Image: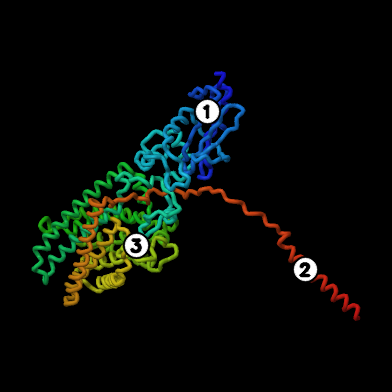
Amino acid sequence: MDNNKNCKSLSISIDPEGGSNCAEERVAKNGEVRIEGGEKVCGSEDMRGNHNHTHTHTPSPCGGKESFGIEKGKGETGQRLNGKGRQRQKQKKLNRHMSLGTAFSIIKRETDLEPSSSLPRSYSMSKENYSMFRTHRQNSPMQGQTPNAQESELADNCPQLSNGQIPAGRYFDALKGPELDVLKDYEDILLPLDEKWPFLLRFPIGSFGICLGLSSQAILWKNLAKIPWLHFLHVAALRINMALWCLSLTALIVILFTYTLKCIFYLEAVRREYYHPVRVNFFFAPWIVCMFLTIGLPQSISEEVHPALWCIFMSPVFALELKIYGQWLSGGKRRLSKVANPSSHLSIVGNFVGALLAAQVGWKEHAMFFWSIGVSHYTVLFVTLYQRLPTSEALPQELHPVFFLFIAAPCTASVAWEKIHGKFDSVSRLAYFIAIFLYASLVVRVNFFRGFRFSVAWWAYTFPMTAASIATIRYSNTVDTTFTRGLAIVLSLISSTTVSTLFVTTLLHALVWHSLFPNDLAIAITHKRIKHKNKKEKPASIDLEHHTAPIKRSMELLRSGIKKQQARLFSWN
């Protein structure tokens, strides 16, 4: 142990530019390891020989650059080198304990990794990152594993990894696009960008839009089978209604089962989707689909609906409305003017669909209750979105398929009112005419909808077109003219063609291109934006005397001139 006297210290440093912390361990003469500001920890490694040196490497927990600390024997100058040999001199202290065994294990794990010279946009913690989204959270930001020194460091020194509720404004700051699913260039995420994430993490709540599109088509073909002037399509329409109903039921079961697994294994990801200003509205989708399937039930299965089904499907919708509408009313960070976006119409549509189903089972008072709630909140939402308030950051400047959600609420409202009162009266026509005008204003600008990246959430934008077709069929039954008949046929063909095209595109993305579910960047944003500390030159001090010297000279000349003029006046007097 005499040779150990020459080995004085072991330093572990991390470049402070990335906002990271540094730990420095002291190796005493007796082989003990001390951490500044902490208790001593016995070293488990034997430091022998003057020529042997030890270097340790600690990865940056906040995505910054990494550096190595090397200190040789007594009398030699310590060197601190990063992965490319640059000299790093600034260090910060980290209050934690790390044994030599932990340090050497980190070296062994990281020796094959080449430190990056640029600031990364994701945390390089390998596959352990995914555990932070798993269920059964402990006192560590990681889930499902025992906390260790690295995880404690992440929890204490990176507030970006905290598991609290993410504010709505944070989603607007970190994401862009009408669906708030595109990461901004200067933002970092918690998961790696260069590899495919687990399937459940990539499975979004927007997948229920597939069920919305298919189940609404089942209702459309059920209504087409009842049109008197289309009696030649009666048998074919009923068969198509049965096929679409079975297909949509199968899709609902598969998607619901998959998302339930996501809730079980990745609850944190589900929570982040619930706090997302756009995706929170898709939590209404499963229950709206269930009511669509009940309304579009084929006649060969049953012609009557039990009221208990309405109670089961409408209770979650009512609970979600109390939560979301309460946030709109009470203000704060999730007030309506802040989070309003076209997807918010899904929460409105749930009231009208519930009113339609309630009227079908014979509960007219319940139907009127939810219809009035839907109309009042649709009016406020429509005005908020139509004005394009500066605080409504989620509303895109360009047209997007999401705008078709504007026509969903008035269409379903007109059909629901007809079911409540038994005829397509002036109130139903008022809502229908508003929907048709909005539909026409979007169709004439169809060229503006090109060039957008396909998303599975596009399915949710197809059922408003189907709702417009159903409302037109009901209107044509009241106002039976050639124009209304032709309009009903044209709108039905457009909606069916759109759904068929999306169905084929979805199959191609899923089975051929394998790109249906890309990495869901929206759930992996940090709790706070990481501010990378870059070295900036201090501005040079301003020499006030130098800059004000010309002004002083001119003032002196002015004073001297005034004095000479006064002297001449006195001499003349």
Mark 1 surroundings: few (<14), some (14-19) or many (≥20) residues within 10 A: some
- The residue singled out by tag 1 in the image is 53
In terms of secondary structure, where does tag 2 sit? Answer: helix
Q: Locate residue 214, reporting x and y percent.
A: 21, 58
The disc labelled 2 sits on which kind of residue?
Answer: Met
Q: Is 531 on the left-hand or right-hand side of 220?
A: right
Tell me if residue 474 comes above or below residue 71 in the rendering.
below
Asked whether the residues under the numbered discs 1 and 2 touch, taking CB atoms below 8 Å apart as contact, a structural biologist would say no
Mark 2 surroundings: few (<14), some (14-19) or many (≥20) residues within 10 A: few
Which residue is more in the foreground, 238 or 33?
A: 33
Q: Locate residue 415, reporting x and y percent.
A: 23, 66
In terms of secondary structure, where does tag 1 sit? Answer: loop
**Mark 1 or mark 2: whose residue is earlier in sequence:** 1
Nearest to viewer (mark 3 / mark 2): 2
Q: Locate residue 146, reporting x and y percent.
A: 39, 33
Q: Is 226 on the left-hand or right-hand side of 563?
A: left
Nearest to viewer (mark 1 / mark 3): 1
The number of numbered badges drawn on the structure is 3
Q: Residue at x 34, y 50 (%)?
A: 520
Check the picture and name the quadrant holding the N terminus.
Answer: top right
Q: Locate residue 242, reporting x and y percent.
A: 13, 57
Cα separation, mark 1 vs mark 3, equals 63 Å
Which residue is more in the foreground, 446 or 146?
A: 446
Q: Residue at x 9, y 69 (%)?
A: 231
In terms of secondary structure, where does tag 3 sit? Answer: helix
The disc labelled 1 sits on which kind of residue?
Answer: His
**Mark 3 or mark 2: whose residue is earlier in sequence:** 3
Q: Which mark is residue 342?
A: 3
